[in-house]
C-alpha cells in the first residue's frame, strides 16, 4: 500500500486521512457465508502487514452503506468492501461520492463477482485481492456516472435488464447458472424494444434486443458482454444487439461467456464518452443493481477512483 503521511490533507478533499488505516466492511452472508469464513484470514493478513484495521460487519445494505460513509468521512486511508457485486457497487459509490479522500479495496466473496473479474482479479482466490491491497499500490480506474449513481461495470437496459430483474427474484439456482435460466425464460416472450440513443451528441433511433454500456467487460455471472471494455481507457463501450429472432438469441446466448457473440452481424459495438438512453418505461441495472427509472445519462469519469487491482 502506498504510504501516506498522517494528518495531511489531500488536494480537493478538505479532510485528513491516514494511509495505513483500513475500514473493512463485510457482508457476512455473501457467497453462502463465504465472506464470514474468509474474514479472519483477510483481517489477519492486513494486521500482519502493519495496517490498522477496523472490521465492520453489516446486517443490511443500509447499514453497510452507513458504515462505509462514516469511515470515508472520517478520513480512512482505504475503504475495503468484501462480499458480492452489490457490496462492490456500494463501495464504488461511497468512494466516488467523496473524491480524493480514500482509496478502494475490493474483495470478491459473492457468487457473481463480475466487477472484480472485470478488473483482472482472480475471483476464485479472494485472499489474493487482500494481498494486493496490503502490498499496493492502488491504480486509478474510470467509472460510469449514470445520472446520480456510479457504476464500475456494466449498465444493462434491454433484454439483459429483464433477465437481471428475473434472476434477482430467483432463489435458485445460484451463481451464473441463475442468469442463464432467467435468460431462457425471458427469451420465450421477448420482442425488440425501441430506443432513442444520443452517442457523443449524435442522435439515433433504433429497435434492439439488448443495449449494454460497459466500463469493464462482464455482467451476469461471467457473461462477457463488452469484451474489449477497459476501465482505464477513458471511454465507455456500447454493445447493441439489433433486432433478431428468438432462435438467434438462443444460439448467441452461450457465446456471451466467451465474447464470441460479437462476431454476429446483428451485433454493433461503439466507443464513446457519453451516451443518453431513452425509451418508454426504461428500467436499467448497473453492476446488477436497479437504477432509477427514466432516461439514463451515462458519462465516463476517467480515473475517478484509485483501486487495488492488477
Image (spheres, rainbow, N blue to C red):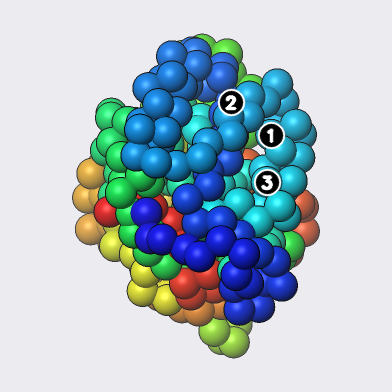
Which residue: 37% across, 22% down? 41
Identify the secondary structure beneath mark 1.
helix
Numbered badge on residue 64: 1
Q: Earlier in the sequence, mark 1 or mark 3?
A: 1
Numbered badge on residue 184: none
Residue situated in front as seen by the camera: 107 or 44: 44
Which residue: 27% across, 54% down? 310
The picture places residue 69, in percent across and down from the top left corner, at 72, 48
Q: Residues within 10 Å of mark 1 (few under 14, many from 20)?
A: many
Q: Quadrant of residue 54?
A: top right
The picture places residue 289, in percent across and down from the top left corner, at 62, 41
Identify the secondary structure beneath mark 2.
loop
Q: Earlier in the sequence, mark 2 or mark 3?
A: 2
User: Is mark 1 in CB contact (under 8 Å) with mark 2?
Assistant: yes
Q: Which residue is mark 2?
A: 27
Which residue: 56% across, 19% down? 28
Q: Residue furthest bottom?
A: 201
How much space separates mark 1 and mark 2, taking CA atoms? 8 Å
Q: Quadrant of residue 67?
A: top right
Viewer can see residue 163: no
Q: Residues within 10 Å of mark 2 (few under 14, many from 20)?
A: many
Above-or-below relation of 275 to 230: below
Q: Earlier in the sequence, mark 1 or mark 2?
A: 2
Identify the secondary structure beneath mark 3.
helix
Q: Which residue is mark 3?
A: 71
Which residue: 48% across, 75% down? 302
Viewer can see residue 20: yes
The picture places residue 35, in percent across and down from the top left corner, at 47, 21
How much space separates mark 2 and mark 3, taking CA atoms? 16 Å
Amino acid at each position: 500500500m502506498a504510504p501516506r503521511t498522517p494528518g495531511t490533507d489531500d488536494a480537493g478533499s478538505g479532510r485528513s486521512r491516514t494511509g495505513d488505516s483500513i475500514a473493512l466492511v463485510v457482508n457476512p452472508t455473501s457467497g453462502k457465508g463465504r465472506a464470514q469464513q474468509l474474514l479472519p484470514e483477510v483481517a489477519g493478513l492486513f494486521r500482519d502487514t502493519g495496517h490498522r484495521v477496523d472490521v465492520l460487519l453489516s446486517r443490511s445494505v443500509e447499514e453497510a452503506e452507513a458504515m462505509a460513509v462514516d469511515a470515508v468521512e472520517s478520513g480512512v486511508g482505504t475503504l475495503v468492501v468484501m462480499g458480492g457485486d452489490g457490496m462492490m457497487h456500494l463501495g464504488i459509490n461511497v468512494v466516488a461520492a467523496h473524491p480524493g479522500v480514500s482509496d478502494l479495496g475490493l474483495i470478491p466473496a459473492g457468487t457473481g463477482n463480475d466487477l472484480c473479474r472485470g478488473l483482472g482479479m482472480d475471483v476464485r482466490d479472494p485472499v489474493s485481492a487482500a494481498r494486493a491491497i496490503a502490498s499496493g499500490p492502488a491504480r486509478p480506474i474510470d467509472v460510469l456516472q449514470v445520472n446520480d449513481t456510479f457504476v464500475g461495470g456494466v449498465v444493462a437496459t434491454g433484454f439483459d435488464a429483464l433477465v437481471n430483474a428475473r434472476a434477482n427474484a430467483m432463489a435458485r439456482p445460484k451463481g451464473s447458472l441463475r442468469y442463464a435460466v432467467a435468460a431462457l425464460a425471458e427469451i420465450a416472450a421477448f420482442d425488440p424494444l425501441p430506443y432513442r440513443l444520443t452517442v457523443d451528441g449524435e442522435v439515433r433511433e433504433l429497435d434492439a434486443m439488448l443495449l449494454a454500456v460497459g466500463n469493464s467487460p462482464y455482467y451476469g455471472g461471467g457473461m462477457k458482454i463488452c469484451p474489449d471494455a477497459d476501465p482505464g481507457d477513458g471511454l465507455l463501450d456500447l454493445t447493441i444487439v439489433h433486432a433478431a429472432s428468438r432462435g438467434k438469441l438462443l444460439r448467441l446466448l452461450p457465446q456471451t461467456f466467451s465474447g464470441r457473440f460479437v462476431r454476429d452481424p446483428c451485433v454493433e459495438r461503439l466507443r464513446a464518452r457519453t451516451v443518453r438512453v431513452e425509451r418508454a418505461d426504461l428500467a436499467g441495472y448497473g453492476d446488477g443493481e436497479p437504477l432509477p427509472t427514466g432516461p439514463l445519462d451515462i458519462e465516463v469519469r476517467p480515473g475517478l477512483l484509485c483501486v487495488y487491482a492488477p
